[in-house]
Structure formats: structure tokens, C-alpha cells
Image (tube, rainbow, N blue to C red):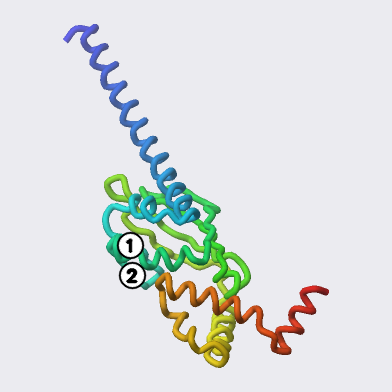
């Protein structure tokens, strides 16, 4: 091999290395873009865009609780969540070993009632073949279980006593269940018992 031939081969190898490096960089950018598109689609309740970002099944793993849906099965849960007009925001995002680690804030009518502040989670978004393979919720940040449970039980108890036709809303994760949940919150917050009247007066003061 002459010096000129060697130089051509060296230039070719260098170009291949640069191309591979750029390709890897683009893949990293694509993952972040997929995550942003996913959150954006949730915010506008675009079911087709959300499910289109997943590889096949919809996999949500919450700590030790694993949930896997077909795209058709997920539609009912998606409708339930959308009724409460959720707003999601990515607070932090970084890539670790091919996965995206995110801190995500979620706020909606249901969450505001149950804990009066956004729901913040740490999540790991895993990818396969250029699509989302699964989303793992690995930590709840600042979640106050006692407040959440107390507010939920107050609502359920009041509905059982005053609006029994709405009973069961708390476990019904369908569009109908969400509408009942929404109505339950509306009626509970508008109730005229003495405790609620005192609370309204304090808020005005």
C-alpha cells in the first residue's frame, strides 16, 4: 500500500467514526424529543400520539406494581385521566445508560383536591427500536399519603351519605367513573354544612 492509499484509507476511517458519533448523538437527541412529545401529547389528551410513541404494549411500572396494557385496553384509562384535565411538566431530564431519567410534575383537578399540590415523580423511560418500551415510576417526591387518604375518605364518606348514586366512583377508572369523580368533588366542595361554611369564610379572610 502506497502512502497515498494509506492516507485515503485513514481519511475514510475518520469519516466513518465521525458519522457513527453523529448518529449516536442524534439518537440521544431523539430520545429527549420523544419524551417531550409524549408529555406534550398527554397535555392535549392526544391518545393516538401518546400510543404511537410506544413500541407495542403500554407498560407502566409503579415501584413494585407492574401494569401492561394493549393500546386498546389503555384507551379507557386514558379517557379517565383526561377528564381531570391534567397538566404535565418535565422538571429534569438526563440520559443514563441508554434510558432517560426524568422528574415529572403532574397537576389536575383530582390531585389538587386530594393533596392540594402537584404530584411529582421520578421516572425512567426505557426505549427499544426507537420507541418507548416502558415507563417506570421509581420514586414519589413529597407525596403525603396521610393527607391523600384523609381527603379521599372524607369525599367517599360524604358521597355515600348525601349522593349515593355516585357511589363507586373512586374505583371506576373509566370515562364514566371520572365524570362521577368530578361531580363528587364539585358537590362536596359546594356543600353547605357548617364546617364548609367556616372554611369558605376563612378563605375569604
Residue at (80, 73) in percent of width and height: 204
Which class describes the residues within 10 Å of circle 2: few (<14), some (14-19), or many (20+)? few
Image quadrant containing the C terminus: bottom right
Q: Which residue is mark 1?
A: 59
Outermost right residue: 205
* Earlier-in-chain disc, 2 versus 1: 1
- Asked whether the residues under the numbered discs 2 and 1 touch, taking CB atoms below 8 Å apart as contact, a structural biologist would say yes
Secondary structure beneath label 2: strand
Residue at (47, 66) in percent of width and height: 139
Q: Position of residue 150 (x, y in %)?
A: 58, 84
Outermost left residue: 1
Outermost front residue: 165
Q: Position of residue 36 (x, y in %)?
A: 46, 47
In the visual, does 143 lie left or right of 72? right
Q: Tell me where residue 67 sits by quadrant.
A: bottom left
Outermost bottom residue: 161
- Residues 10 and 69: in front is 69
Image quadrant containing the N terminus: top left
Residue at (43, 64) in percent of width and height: 137
Q: Position of residue 183 (x, y in %)?
A: 54, 76
Vertical relation: 42 (above or below) 36: below
Vertical relation: 171 (above or below) 61: below
Which class describes the residues within 10 Å of circle 1: few (<14), some (14-19), or many (20+)? many
Q: Which mark, by number, is residue 66?
A: 2
- Residues 107 and 179: in front is 179
Q: Tell me where residue 190 sits by quadrant.
A: bottom right
Vertical relation: 34 (above or below) 193: above
- Gap between marks 2 and 1, in whole Å? 8 Å
Q: Position of residue 141 (x, y in %)?
A: 54, 66
Amino acid at each position: 500500500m502506497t502512502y497515498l492509499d494509506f492516507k485515503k484509507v485513514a481519511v475514510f476511517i475518520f469519516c466513518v467514526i465521525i458519522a457513527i458519533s453523529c448518529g449516536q448523538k442524534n439518537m440521544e437527541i431523539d430520545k429527549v424529543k420523544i419524551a417531550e412529545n409524549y408529555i406534550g401529547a398527554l397535555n392535549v389528551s392526544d391518545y393516538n400520539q401518546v400510543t404511537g410513541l410506544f413500541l407495542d404494549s403500554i407498560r407502566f411500572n409503579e415501584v413494585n406494581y407492574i401494569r401492561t396494557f394493549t393500546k386498546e385496553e389503555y384507551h379507557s384509562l386514558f379517557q379517565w385521566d383526561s377528564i381531570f384535565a391534567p397538566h404535565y411538566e418535565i422538571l429534569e431530564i438526563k440520559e443514563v445508560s441508554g434510558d432517560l431519567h426524568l422528574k415529572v410534575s403532574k397537576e389536575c383537578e383530582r390531585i389538587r383536591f386530594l393533596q392540594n399540590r402537584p404530584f411529582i415523580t421520578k421516572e425512567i423511560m426505557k426505549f427499544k427500536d426507537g420507541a418507548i418500551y416502558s415507563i417506570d415510576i421509581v420514586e414519589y417526591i413529597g407525596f403525603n399519603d396521610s393527607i391523600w387518604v384523609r381527603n379521599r375518605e372524607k369525599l367517599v364518606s360524604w358521597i355515600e351519605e348525601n349522593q349515593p348514586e355516585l357511589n363507586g366512583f373512586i374505583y371506576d377508572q373509566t370515562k364514566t367513573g371520572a365524570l362521577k369523580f368530578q361531580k363528587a368533588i364539585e358537590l362536596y366542595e359546594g356543600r353547605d354544612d357548617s364546617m364548609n361554611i367556616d372554611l369558605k369564610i376563612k378563605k375569604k379572610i
